[in-house]
Image (cartoon, rainbow, N blue to C red):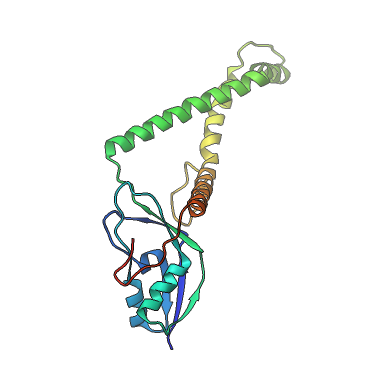
Amino acid sequence: MAFVFVKPRESFIAPVGVPISVGMLAEVASDDAELERRLRGTPFLKPLREGQGATVVSSLDFVRAVRLIDPTLDIDLSGADFTVVKPRVRQSPFWAGFWIISVSLVLFFGAMMAIIAFHADTDMGQVHQAIYHLVTGNPTEHPLVLQIPYSIGVGLGVLIFFNAFSRRRPSSDPSPLDVQMHLYDQENDQYLVSQGTPLPGPQKEGRG
């Protein structure tokens, strides 16, 4: 009796118009190399259409798909209970650039207003005047020797905090923004799982 290990993924972004096999949605391993290759290529879902909503796949659907190949297989199932399958969004370069510029401008001016409001509340100008007077003994209304480095330091501090200068490698530490986006994706997938209806199970020709 052959032994099969199946580990479904938590989510998968599927290319539009391409049939989805078991190997795309789950890691498959077996002591029988030919059986493993066959299981990886087993059709599982019909091709997704552009604009189609997410499809929720139960881990038991993988068990059913493997059983259709050989009912006598011994299956070890681990990993996610549900897999959220979404079609890949195709966006024109024009609209992609438009949204990137728009969001960047909104974030830039929003962050600028937040920093200005913070400094107004704390009266940072007076703080700089007091520090300058304390260090030099000469009062001045505009201690530029403090204000200019401080302004540059605020901008550099934000860039360093978000790892803007680090090389983007898969093994590199994620930035706080990367972590928040990952948490958002996880919560979004959990919501889709709670609201969606799992598939009743694939047939031999695949099922959408």
Q: Residue at x 38, y 84 (%)?
A: 32
Q: Give the residue drawn at x 37%, y 31%.
A: 101
Q: Nearer the viewer, residue 129 or 70?
A: 70
Quick check: 145 above or below 21?
Answer: above
- Going 30% across and 35% down the picture, which residue do you hit? 95
In the displayed structure, would residue 2 be above or below residue 133? below
- From the top left corner, tell me how far across and down residue 198 is, in percent: 45, 60
On the picture, is 4 further left or further right than 92?
A: right
Q: Is residue 114 visible?
A: yes
In terms of depth relative to the viewer, which is nearer, 188 or 58?
58
Asked if residue 146 shows in the view, the reply is no
Quarter holding the N terminus is bottom left
Location of residue 202 by image quarter: bottom left
Task: Give the image location of residue 39, x and y in percent.
Answer: 35, 75
Q: Is residue 28 left or right of residue 178?
A: left
Where residue 164 appears, x then y in whole percent?
47, 41
Q: Nearer the viewer, residue 56 or 107?
A: 56
The count of marks equals 0
Residue 173 location, x and y as percent? Answer: 52, 52
Q: Quadrant of the C terminus?
A: bottom left
Name the residue furthest bottom: 1
**Residue drawn at (51%, 67%), measured in percent from left and top?**
79
